[in-house]
Image: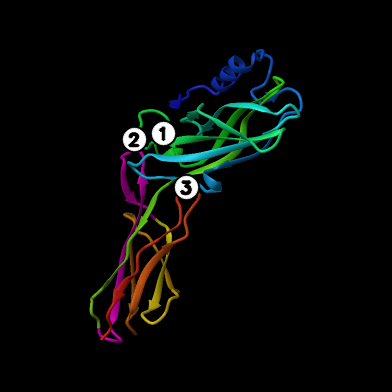
Amino acid sequence: MRTTTRIALLGTTFALVAGAVGATSAQAADGGSGDITIDKVVINGGKPVVVGTTKVVSAKVSVTASDNSGIARTTYISAFGPTPNYAQIWDDEITCVKASATTSTCTGTLTFDPQASTGFVGNSAAATWKLGTLVSANDANYIHRDAATTFKVQRNSRLTANASPEPVKKGKTLTVTGLLSRANWDTHTYRGYTKQKVTLQYRKKTSTKYTDVKTVTSSSTGSLKATVTASADGYFRYKFAGTSTTPAVTSAGDFVDVK
């Protein structure tokens, strides 16, 4: 059964492992037996998990493991968010496919719901998460890792651009405004992303390549403003490089007719 749960105590993971494999209280949360190994873990194709304000985001997870006797199952995968709001997203519906007599790749899905009452705990969840997993072999060997790998969870970003006046006379001043915003998981709305460097770019109507014009800083409300001299028909857009908590984003190009 796939569930999403908020975990209050770090010791919860160990309790689950102990019940699943018969571990004693003296064993550490990271543990195992025999020669079983976790060879590779991939989350969301190696990309950050980007979450907006309403849409549920599903991230596929694959765990490749090996043992001389072969892999029996992956009991669970679980994603742990940062403290102090310690969150866990859990999946125990795992499918394993043999790659050889000794190696299997087991896959599951982690579900990130920004509006769930549990699992996500506000903007502090935009951080580096840990992926825990428990894998068992056919000879009853097992391996458990609280942090088999790490991955980023990010707040989705939006960016706009609008050049005016349109049309504009050649040699006159053109103003390009915009808004850089990102998902706010506390309010479930998009709010301006403040004090961020954003690059204004321009592409001539006859070209396919954008070039950098200047860099501006978003205001206290996330708004952007840049002035340029109109020279020829073309498109203006803004480009944001992203941060550790927010992905890169590029606005659509706004065409300007220069008379």
| Residue 244: percent from left, percent from top | 50, 49
Q: Position of residue 21 (x, y in %)?
A: 63, 17
Say left or right for 103 vs 7: right
Q: Decide if residue 131 is on the left or right side of residue 189.
A: right
Q: Is residue 202 magenta?
A: no
Q: Where is residue 34, by image quadrant? A: top right
Q: Residue at x 66, y 26 (%)?
A: 30
Rendered position, 250 above or below 64:
below
The residue carrying pointer 2 sits among few (fewer than 14), some (14 to 19) or many (20 or more) residues within 10 Å by Cα, namely some
The label shown at residue 115 is: 2
Question: Residue at label 3?
Answer: 245
**What amino acid type should be assigned to the residue bearing mark 2?**
Gln
Labels 2 and 3: the sequence-earlier one: 2
Which stretch appears magenta?
169-194
Q: Is residue 160 above or below residue 173?
A: above
* Residue 172: in magenta span: yes
Quadrant assignment for the C terminus: bottom left
Measured from the top left, where is residue 16 in percent x and y?
A: 56, 19
Q: Amino acid at mark 3?
A: Thr
Label 3 crowd (10 A; few <14 / some 14-19 / many >=20): many
Judged from the image, the secondary structure of the residue bearing numbered disc 3 is loop
Return the residue at label 1. Answer: 120
